[in-house]
Amino acid sequence: MDDKLLLDTFIKQVIEQGNYTELDRNYLYNRILNLVGEGVEKLTTTKNEIIDLKDGLVEYAVQHGKVGETLNEQDCLGAELMNFITPLPSKVNQDFWQTYQQNSPEEAIQNFYDLSKRNDYIKTKAIAKNIYFPVETSYGQLEITINLSKPEKDPKQIALAKKMKASGYPLCQLCMENEGYQGRVNYPARANHRIIRFDLDDKQWGFQYSPYAYFNEHCIFLDTIHEPMEITKQTFNNLLGIIEQFPGYFVGSNADLPIVGGSILTHEHYQGGRHTFAMEKAPIETELKFAGYEDIQAGIVKWPMSVIRLRGNSKEDLVDLADKILKTWRRYSDEKVSVLAESNGEKHHTITPIARKRDGQLELDLVLRDNQTSEQYPDGIYHPHPDVQHIKKENIGLIEVMGLAILPPRLKGELQEVEKYLLGQENKMEEYHQVWADDIKQKYSDINQDNVDTIIHQELGRVFARVLEDAGVYKHDETGRMAFKRFVEEVGIVD
């Protein structure tokens, strides 16, 4: 490829992809020089993609002292550069709803998704680094991701962040005030961030994409008011309302209690996207008919966690029945199987709900959650148990509940050392993998260079299935099935 001037090529892309014209060239040239540093105009490149060009400009700015060495500072500059191709929020919203009404909701959603990738708000280059593979299990094909997309904080960034006074603005990373926020050493860049506003049951909500997506079109629906997450009857109504407005998407909510909840409990929000998870494919194991709701198809799902599936055409009936199940679960105890609604004034029960449309009908999956701890399981009785925490120690949130493991980046290097151990090579395997690695050695008679990756993948899938079983309230044995039956009887089923 022929060398081209980096700055000129970037400006050419901005004019082609943004709302600027040739008349704005000098203006763009000078604004970018100010951000990146004079002298960049002489720099050449063989790149053509705007994100690669942006990276080249940021690299020059770092080398010439126009931006700090921490990743957050560089991201702030990168987002500011990509903001040149990002329309104003009012324009983005106007275009979205005009396309939604005049053409189709699907086209409006696709256009917004394409913009969020094109302007580098969705970090496609970083996401491509993630390790992903499916694994067949007795619960269907689970998905494993080792998350390498989010950069780990470097020591300089941590040191600088400690010196900074807490700003309190924005209140959290899901607040509407993030739109266009410059970012800082201890807070992510949001200059190129845009949010679609929409009405949900007479309240304004926001729709955006996740910068570090874990699945196709991973998006977030967020309340415009900064209020804590809470699973209520309104939650079910909201979820079903969202899938009606955003066709082709599922949407679900993390639980609203520590241990079983997500990473952000301070701001009401849901996650959605265009992806079919293993839980959705899982069949009904035990059919149920709830009294007063005979038109609702219901059943217990064959899944490692405790899931009740409801399906029907009446949104009102689905919401009412889901609320009845939630209220019953909130107060329900069964000490025979360590199910306790509350202790010492602390409530333990909630639900992780997921909504989708299937075959023209509305569908709700209600996952029963219990956040008790005990002396034996101080991290949580229904949380990954100690013997699997060498692989997964973090909370089991919405995405994992549905069958997609999000494993920590440390595992990339650690699993390479486990493979060396299995092959009898010199290694630096972590001690906490020893029991697991020895079990694998004993299980497989012939481990070699050609099959060791496959074996590790299979065994990771089995560990993840165990993690989900640990998080399941009612276990897949006779005792668990009878206990689950006692609960649905308490809700009110027809024999």
Image (tube, rainbow, N blue to C red):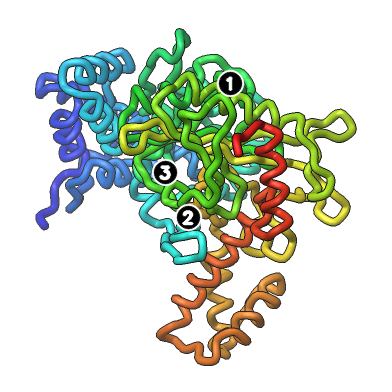
**Is residue 54 among what the camera can see?**
yes
What is the residue that sits farthest to the front in this orientation?
495
- According to the image, label 3 marks what residue? 213
* Closer to viewer: mark 2 or mark 3: 3
**Residues at marks 2 and 1 touching, judged by CB atoms closer than 8 Å:** no
Q: Which sits earlier in the primary sequence, circle 1 or circle 3?
A: 3
Q: Is residue 163 above or below residue 460?
A: above
Q: Please state the horizontal and vertical placement of residue 428, each as a whole percent of the image.
A: 63, 78
Measured Cα–Cα span from mark 2 to mark 3:
11 Å
Instruction: Identify the residue position indicated by label 2 in the image.
Output: 148
Name the spot of residue 109 as percent of width and height, x first: 28, 29
- Identify the element where label 3 is drawn: loop
Q: CA distance from mark 2 to mark 1?
A: 37 Å
- SS at mark 1 in the image: helix
Residue 9 % position (x, y): 16, 40
Please give the label number shown on residue 233: 1
Residue 229, visible in the rendered structure:
no
